[in-house]
Image (tube, helix red, strand yellow):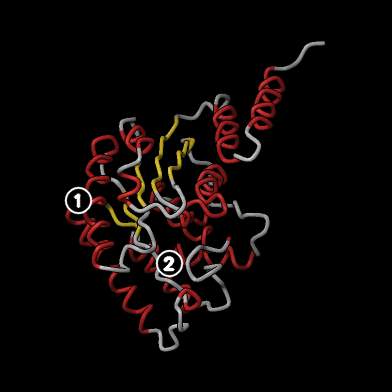
Amino acid sequence: MRFSRPLILLLFVAGLGWFEFGQPLPAKALARRAEDAFDRRPAREILILGNSRTFYHDMPDMIRAMADSARENQKFEITLDAPPGASFEILWNDSDTQSLLKDRWDDVILQPESRAESSPDLTASFETYGIKLIEASRGVSGQPRLIVNWAYGPSAWDDGDPDGSGRAAQYSALQSDTKTLGDRAGAKLVNIGRLWATIVADHPEIALTEDGNHPTLAGSYLLALILYADLSRHDVAGVTYTPAQLDPKTAATLKQAVRDYQIFYM
């Protein structure tokens, strides 16, 4: 009996996936790279450095799915380095991150930790190690991208932040501190925080966080949309991918919000 090359490759990847039980993301990444061996499009190598906000709901895989659904002429090969709770300081001191920064990347995207504005010490760490990471990634990627984070939701505050003053103060600090870091280090800002606040105000029926911090599926989809829009410079109207568990009306609302954002800010 003869087997086709795709079938042999599929069986090989399935076997590796079995040995990766309990570590699905490496197996999934391996399967993607195996599939890409048959994809003749030129590769666009993208490194994302972040934390749990970044990897929730396999957000980087959404970016790739969006690009493929929009028929991009490049295959987005995305590598994620995002330990749970990782700060820029933790990433900088991690040997795996340092090894990745020595590779050649077309794009590097950095997402700060959610606690960066929680104290003067953490803010100082965010600035010091953010500059180090950005400068290290600039050498291999041109101008890195720096995500402006979203503020915590009410449920993340001990008292629920009934008057919204805590969220307003954090939002202001996130905007100003990240802009300062971007200006000092020469990074391009991707302001998910501004778009996030708009969705919260205009569409309170759409929950963007699960616990006031980590994104829901809708929140991860929104983050993937704006990153895809910034990377591709294309209208997200061309994106047909929607996660199976995401309400199509919610997805359409988020896509329109990103389209509006593109008009004014991209």
Q: How many marks?
A: 2
Return the x and y of residue 214 as percentages of the image width and height.
Answer: 50, 63
Q: Of marks 1 and 2, which one's residue comes earlier in the chain?
A: 1
* Residue position marked by numbered label 1 in the rendering: 185
Q: Which residue is at the front of the view, 190 or 122?
A: 122
Q: Residue at x 33, y 73 (%)?
A: 170
Q: Which residue is drawn at 65% across and 30% down?
A: 19
**Label 1 to label 2, Cα distance in Å?**
28 Å
Residue 13, placed above or below residue 57:
above
Label 1 is placed on what type of residue?
A: Ala
Q: Is residue 62 left or right of residue 112?
A: right
Q: Which residue is at the front of the view, 140 or 259?
A: 140
The answer to whether residue 73 shows anywhere in this view is no
Label 2 is placed on what type of residue?
A: Asp
Residue 6, placed above or below residue 130:
above
Q: Quadrant of residue 180?
A: bottom left
* Residue position marked by numbered label 2 in the rendering: 260
Image marks 1 and 2: residues in contact by CB distance under 8 Å: no
Decide: few, some or many residues near mark 1? Use Cα within 10 Å; few <14, some 14-19, many ≥20: some
Label 1 element class? helix
Q: Which residue is drawn at 43% across and 71% down?
A: 152
Decide: few, some or many residues near mark 2? Use Cα within 10 Å; few <14, some 14-19, many ≥20: some
Q: Residue at x 34, y 32 (%)?
A: 99
The quadrant of the picture occupied by the C terminus is bottom left
Q: Residue 172 carries which label?
A: none
Residue 143, placed above or below residue 227:
above
Residue 219, placed above or below residue 188:
below
The answer to whether residue 151 shows anywhere in this view is yes
